[in-house]
Image (cartoon, rainbow, N blue to C red):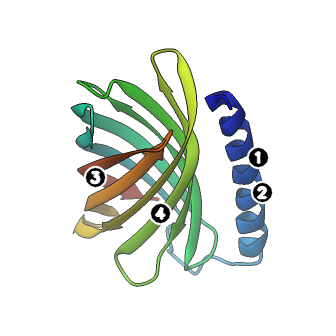
């Protein structure tokens, strides 16, 4: 089975999850002053069995309920890893500051496209009104290989 075929299945699942999350949050109303959108810039290190590389990425999240957000990210890993990942993200917010992320998507490496699944956790530390720093750890599964991604995101809520 080719990676592109896995990617198509992954994207179909993503569309279903996104639609369900959006429907679940359609009745949620924002309270006065609540910020529903978040954008983050990520800088970190990706480690795999092949080596490591510096990672940089950008992500967006739209909060659809107090506990659930949906969005996506694009991330580039250099060095030995040398890949680009594009994924949708379902973000759970179980307690103030914490976020747990589930991200199906596609990784592009050496001209090949392979399905990926990334699972992660982060904690937001407010540094100014509407701004935060978030240490983050993720596990990315691609073609049976596990990659660990550690880093720090700076985020803005609006």
* Quadrant hosting residue 30: bottom right
Q: Secondary structure at mark 3?
A: strand
Q: How many numbered discs, if any?
A: 4
Query: Which residue is depicted at the point 77% across and 66% down?
Result: 20
Q: Residues within 10 Å of mark 3 (few under 14, many from 20)?
A: some
Mark 3 and mark 1: Cα distance apart in space:
30 Å
Query: Which residue is depicted at the point 24% across and 51% down?
Result: 150
Q: Which residue is mark 1?
A: 12
Q: Is residue 24 left or right of residue 140?
A: right
Q: Are dots 3 and 2 in contact, CB under 8 Å?
A: no
Which numbered disc, 3 or 2, marks the residue that appears first in the sequence?
2
* Residue 109 position within the rendered picture, expressed as x and y whole percent measured from the top left: 45, 23
Which numbered disc, 4 or 1, marks the residue that appears first in the sequence?
1
Q: Does residue 132 sit above or below 105 in this rendering?
A: below
Q: Which residue is mark 4?
A: 101
* Residue 10 position within the rendered picture, expressed as x and y whole percent measured from the top left: 68, 45
Which numbered disc, 3 or 4, marks the residue that appears first in the sequence?
4
Query: Which residue is depicted at the point 41% across and 70% down?
Result: 99
Quadrant for the N terminus, please: top right
Q: Which residue is mark 3?
A: 154
Q: Residues within 10 Å of mark 1 (few under 14, many from 20)?
A: few
Q: Secondary structure at mark 1?
A: helix
Callout in the foreground (3, 1): 1
Mark 4 and mark 1: Cα distance apart in space:
18 Å
Q: Are dots 3 and 1 in contact, CB under 8 Å?
A: no
Q: Secondary structure at mark 4?
A: strand
Which numbered disc, 2 or 4, marks the residue that appears first in the sequence?
2
* Residue 127 position within the rendered picture, expressed as x and y whole percent measured from the top left: 20, 65
Mark 2 and mark 1: Cα distance apart in space:
6 Å
Q: Secondary structure at mark 2?
A: helix
């Amino acid at each position: 089975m080719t990676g592109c075929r896995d990617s198509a299945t992954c994207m179909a699942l993503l569309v279903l999850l996104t639609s369900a999350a959006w429907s679940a949050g359609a009745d949620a109303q924002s309270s006065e002053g609540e910020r529903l959108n978040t954008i983050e810039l990520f800088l970190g290190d990706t480690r795999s069995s092949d080596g490591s590389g510096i990672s940089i990425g950008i992500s967006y999240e739209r909060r659809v309920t107090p506990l659930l957000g949906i969005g996506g990210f694009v991330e580039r890993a250099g060095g030995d890893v040398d890949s680009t990942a594009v994924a949708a993200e379902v973000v759970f917010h179980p307690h103030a500051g914490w976020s747990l992320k589930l991200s199906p998507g596609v990784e592009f490496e050496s001209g090949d496209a392979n399905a990926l699944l990334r699972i992660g956790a982060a904690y937001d530390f407010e540094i100014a009104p509407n701004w935060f720093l978030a240490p983050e750890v993720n596990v990315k599964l691609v073609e049976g290989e596990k990659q660990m991604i550690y880093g720090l995101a700076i985020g803005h809520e609006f």
